[in-house]
Image: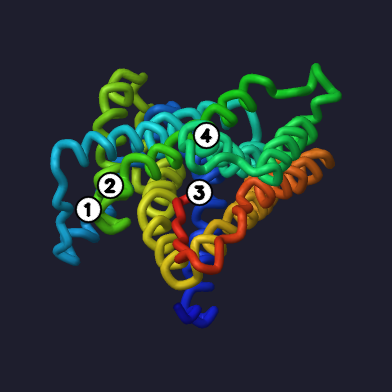
Amino acid sequence: MTAAPARAWVPAFVVAAVSWGSSFLFISIALRGLTPVQVGFGRVLIGAAVLWGMLLVTRSRPRLGIRDVLRIGVVALGLSTVPFVLIPLAQQHITSILASLLNATTPLWTALFVALLIPHERATRTQVAGLVLGTFGIAVLLGAWNIDGIPLLGAALMLAATACYGIGSTMSRMLLTRVDQGPTQLSAVQIAISAVLLLPFAVAAPAPEAGTFAPSSEVLWGLLALGVLGTSFTYVLFWRVVKLAGATTAASVTYVVPVVATVLGITVLREEMHWYEPVGAVVVLAGVWLAQRRPRARTDAPRVETGRPVS
């Protein structure tokens, strides 16, 4: 297949990186008036509305059986239900910068769970080395030598969220390979299921203060930006990059998202960053690069590339 020219996919790549990188800023803003579960629910509710609107406009309604919906529901738990609550919970205790840097560990968890749950994709020595290096990078990222200064609760919640992403990505490879639907249809159903699952928890949470959803409310606009940019259009753009430039190029957005989030955290939220956080992030990303490496395909075998959203 002839590679598409850069001008065909670079704009989508940049918008996806900026959208996912700014999600941590929007979460911080939304938390000023909403509980973590309400942020997660509002995010998927808005994202589902946008995605289903796109399907209505294009007249491409999903055609799924009950088993397909159940499979997507299992994947939704790991990719867009539990982590969308855990991340706002984490950001109540850590900066958006640290949250974004820890979010970069998602491919490490994916590589680990793929090796554990998919027998024919056993981890190579290079991938194991990447996992070990990534673990060391997390320790540096958190400043493990300063035990009293480690934000244990926030870090644990964030790593639990990325572990959910890893499980969800692995389950999507195990359960959705035979679901014959496009990425927009799958994303729309997945996000809608997450909205249904989170609805009772959002209703049970304390009611937002008066004025939270006023047109001038920063909380409302932060939530809208989170739902529209970080939970709907960006997935479509990501899959465009996968189609035009390949999964490897698309997955490199992992390296750009923390940069965007860090710049926004410093310039907009006035957050401080410790010297060891970017150092640890570089070590983590080096581990990610190793963990994502695959053995070279045999020349007599067809090569198939696949990709999954990383945020």
Q: Amino acid at mark 1?
A: Trp
Q: CA distance from mark 3 to mark 1?
A: 21 Å
Q: Position of residue 168 (x, y in %)?
A: 42, 37
Q: Quadrant of residue 269?
A: top right
Camera-side residue of 128 and 275: 128
Residue labelled with disc 4: 113
Residue, x 41% and y 61% (percent of image)? 239
**Circle 2 residue:** 48
Q: Disc 2 and disc 4: Cα gap in Å?
A: 28 Å
Q: Earlier in the sequence, mark 2 or mark 3?
A: 2
Asked if marks 2 and 4 touch (Cβ < 8 Å), the reply is no
The residue tagged with tag 3: helix, strand or loop? loop
Q: Position of residue 247 (x, y in %)?
A: 50, 61
As measured in the structure, the alpha-carbon distance from the residue carrying label 2 to the one carrying label 1 is 6 Å
Residue 9 position, x and y percent, is 48, 73
Measured from the top left, where is residue 251 in percent x and y?
Answer: 55, 57
Q: Secondary structure at mark 2?
A: helix
Distance in Å between CA atoms under marks 4 and 1: 31 Å
The residue tagged 1 is: 52
Classed neighbour count for the residue bearing mark 3: other residues with Cα under 10 Å, few (<14), some (14–19), many (≥20) = many
